[in-house]
Image (cartoon, grey):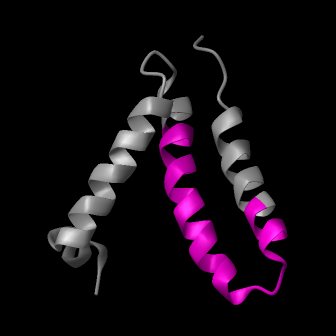
């Protein structure tokens, strides 16, 4: 099933709406476009990383730390507007 098909399902709509709400809280609309994109990708990165870590051997605490670290790298690389 591709992304367009999933978006048409109730679960796809709910995931999109929830993600959009969280991103809206984090995004600085006055920031540069590149920085807004970094913020927008940080939230779905958390979801993707948690899913990817299902197949990687590590302690749960190590997995949580790794996911948070990667997402924060994306989010905190945002620079002030020029």
Given residues 1 and 50, the one toward you in this image is 50
**Picture layout, residue 4 above or below residue 74:** below
| Magenta stretch, overall SS | helix
Q: Where is residue 12? Give x, y as percent.
A: 26, 68
Q: Where's the C terminus, which quadrant?
A: top right
Q: Nearer the viewer, residue 81 or 16?
A: 16
Q: Position of residue 23 (x, y in %)?
A: 43, 40
Residue sitting at x 27%, y 51%:
17
Q: Residue at x 66, y 50 (%)?
A: 71
| Quadrant of residue 55 within the rendered picture | bottom right
All told, the count of numbered labels is 0
Magenta residues span 37-64
Instruction: Say which residue appears at 38% left-offset and 51% top-offset.
Output: 19
Q: Which residue is drawn at the image coordinates 67% and 22% (left, top)?
A: 79
Tell me: 61 left or right of 43: right
Quarter the N terminus occupies = bottom left
Q: Would you say residue 52 sits in the magenta stretch?
A: yes
Q: Could you tell me residue 72's position as x and y percent?
A: 70, 44
Is residue 80 found inside the magenta-colored segment of the image? no
Residue 21 lies in what quarter of the image? Answer: top left
Query: On screen, 72 above or below 67?
Result: above
- Figure check: 55 above or below 72: below
Q: Nearer the viewer, residue 66 or 32?
A: 66
Could you say which quadrant of the image residue 76 lies in?
top right
77 on left or right of 29: right
């Amino acid at each position: 099933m591709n992304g367009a098909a999933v978006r048409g399902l109730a679960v796809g709509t709910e995931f999109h709406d929830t993600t959009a709400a969280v991103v809206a809280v984090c995004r600085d609309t006055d920031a540069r476009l590149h920085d807004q994109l970094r913020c927008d990708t940080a939230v779905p990165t958390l979801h993707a990383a948690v899913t990817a870590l299902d197949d990687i051997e590590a302690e749960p605490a190590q997995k949580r730390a790794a996911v948070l670290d990667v997402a924060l790298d994306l989010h905190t690389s945002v620079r002030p507007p020029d």
